[in-house]
């Protein structure tokens, strides 16, 4: 595995997507480091989308999940412009992608409970809950 630092100095969640696409030669899978339950089967399903969309974004209980998605490197110029303008919210990426393919929450559920698949660990309480969820498996 190759580790790279963010290409841009700005701090925001889409800077990581920008960096991933900078080093990509085609499509790349992006998964947030704090989503411990995303399944390989879901990621394979997203890669198997038959067309060549700019992005494949699954839908979860809170809507689009831009930090568990497949992005085409052709999006890099648009994301670079967004970061340069200070538009660092992930939702802004979702709103600007031309014709993304979305995977419905119902289809996501074939690969596991969506609320579990997209569970984020952001606090000590979240970590305790994730550990309990992992033990339940």
Image (cartoon, rainbow, N blue to C red):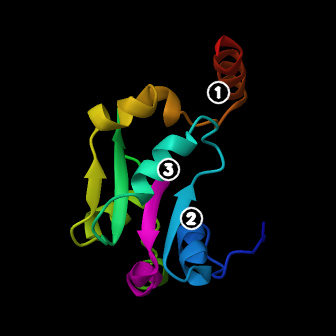
Image coords of residue 101 (percent x, y): 27, 59
Does residue 135 appear in this view? yes
Quadrant in which the N terminus is drawn: bottom right
The quarter holding residue 82 reads bottom left
- Tell me the residue that label 1 is attached to: 126
In-front residue for pair 47/115: 47
Does 115 appear above or below 45? above
Q: Along the polypeptide, which appears first: circle 3 or circle 2?
A: 2
Image height of 73 relative to 3, above or below: below
70 within the magenta span: yes
Q: Quadrant of the C terminus?
A: top right
Q: Residue at x 68, y 21 (%)?
A: 134
Do the residues bearing badges 3 and 2 touch, measured as CB atoms within 8 Å? no
Residue annotated with mark 2? 12
Can you identify the residue that label 3 sits on?
Answer: 43
Q: Which mark is residue 114?
A: none
Tags 1 and 2 touching, CB below 8 Å = no
């Amino acid at each position: 595995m190759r580790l790279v630092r963010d290409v841009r100095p700005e701090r925001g969640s889409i800077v990581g997507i920008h960096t991933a696409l900078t080093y990509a030669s085609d499509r790349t899978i992006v998964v947030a480091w704090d989503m411990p339950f995303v399944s390989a089967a879901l990621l394979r399903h997203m890669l198997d989308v038959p067309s060549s969309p700019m992005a494949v974004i699954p839908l979860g209980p809170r809507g689009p999940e831009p930090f568990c998605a497949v992005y085409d490197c052709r999006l890099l110029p648009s994301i670079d412009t967004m970061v340069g303008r200070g538009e660092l919210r992930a939702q802004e990426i979702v709103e600007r992608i031309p014709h993304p393919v979305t995977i419905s929450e119902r289809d996501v559920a074939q690969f596991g409970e969506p609320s579990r698949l997209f569970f984020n660990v952001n606090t000590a309480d979240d970590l305790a809950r994730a550990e309990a969820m992992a033990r339940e498996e």
